[in-house]
Amino acid sequence: MFQFPIMPPQASEWATRYDFLFWGTNALAAFFTLLVLVLVLVLTTKYRAGSKADRRNPIDHSTILELSWSIPPLCLALTMFFWSAYEFIQYRKMPEKATEIFVIGKQWMWHLQHMNGIRENNELHVLVGQPVKMTMISQDVIHAMYLPDFRAQFHVVPGRYTELQFTPTQTGKFKMLCAMHCGTQHSEMVGSVYVMNAKDYADWLAKGGNRFEPTPLSMADAGKRLFTEKGCGNCHGDVDTERAPTLIGLYGKEREFTTGEKLTADNEYVRESIVTPWRLITKGYDQTMPAYKGQITEEQVLDLMAYIKSVSGSAAGAPTAPAGRETKGTTPGMSGPHSTTDTANREVSAGAAQFKQSETRP
């Protein structure tokens, strides 16, 4: 009984600060709960029916008493508010030099994509001490990526990118869960985060992730190929033309639209421009670009984004393909199961159909 863990391990830099705030809030709530309980018991005992308490001069008003039970709790509540708000703002600032992982939630599995092309399902391998930034989207319903050991959790929403970050401080295997009831088999949406030291992580990368047969393309390369196959370059050339603006240097650049609205190009804007390009049309151009909603998968959108980012100068630090990666096969992506997790995804889980769809990456 005494070996039952009260809290998960503190496996990230954020975990200690989160726990301090968590226990501080609970301690304050417990203090006032006990204070009210004690006062109720004392007063009900003293003034119970038949007691000999002196009731000749009842006090009907006390300014000092009212201030004493109003001002201290107000100050404590404001302290907790500003403390938690400060911590939340600090936590929601994404680290600039982080390993970027793209996540797609789907009933009922997590698909994770590394920038160098390594793909994982319900597993994530990361380097200890290295900040990790997750860019997440859902393929179907609302999910919530929950990493209890890292004290990290955020919603994964269809049609919109959300972000999550953590910096692991311990090596080992940690839980990956969905914190949103997303369907009848929500409980199957579990996985693991493997935090590795530098040597093991380098070996893992050198083997192409050790999960599927090596893939020949990074996300940016896969996006470039799709960009060519879809004929995007016929309009989006190296420079602005009368047909369409160039995409070189797009990320982080402010654009003005026919509506007069201005927006800095980021993941949300690029995705919307691909799947539903009619809402924000760049000033000086007409709506001539076809919408790709329903024609390409979320994974392909992520690949296109990676390619566009690679020609924007903002992905200079992105990892390249692992050393020793072979170029087997003609289709980048997963070509066969090599673990019990994959087998479960294919044969046991109701997410098997979704898993197979993810294999047909064109």
Image (cartoon, helix red, strand yellow):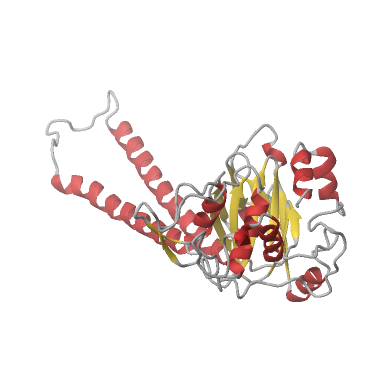
- Examine the image and state in which quarter residue 83 appears: bottom left
Task: Indicate whether 275 appears above or below 183.
Answer: below
Question: Which residue is found at the position 51% from the left and 60% from the top?
Answer: 244
Can residue 8 be seen in this snapshot? no
Left or right: 112, with 67 as reference point: right
The extreme top residue here reads 50
Question: Which residue is found at the position 71% from the left and 61% from the top?
Answer: 225
At which x and y percent is residue 130? 63, 71
Can residue 310 be seen in this snapshot? yes
Question: Which residue is found at the position 40% from the left and 61% from the top?
Answer: 86
At which x and y percent is residue 227? 66, 59
Task: Indicate whether 184 appears above or below 108.
Answer: above
Q: Nearer the viewer, residue 316 or 241?
A: 241
Q: How many marks?
A: 0
Question: Which residue is found at the position 40% from the left and 44% from the top?
Answer: 34
Q: Nearer the viewer, residue 120 or 267?
A: 267
The extreme front residue here reads 242
Left or right: 34, with 95 as reference point: left
- Examine the image and state in which quarter residue 131 appears: bottom right
Q: Nearer the viewer, residue 327 or 209?
A: 327
At which x and y percent is residue 4? 68, 49
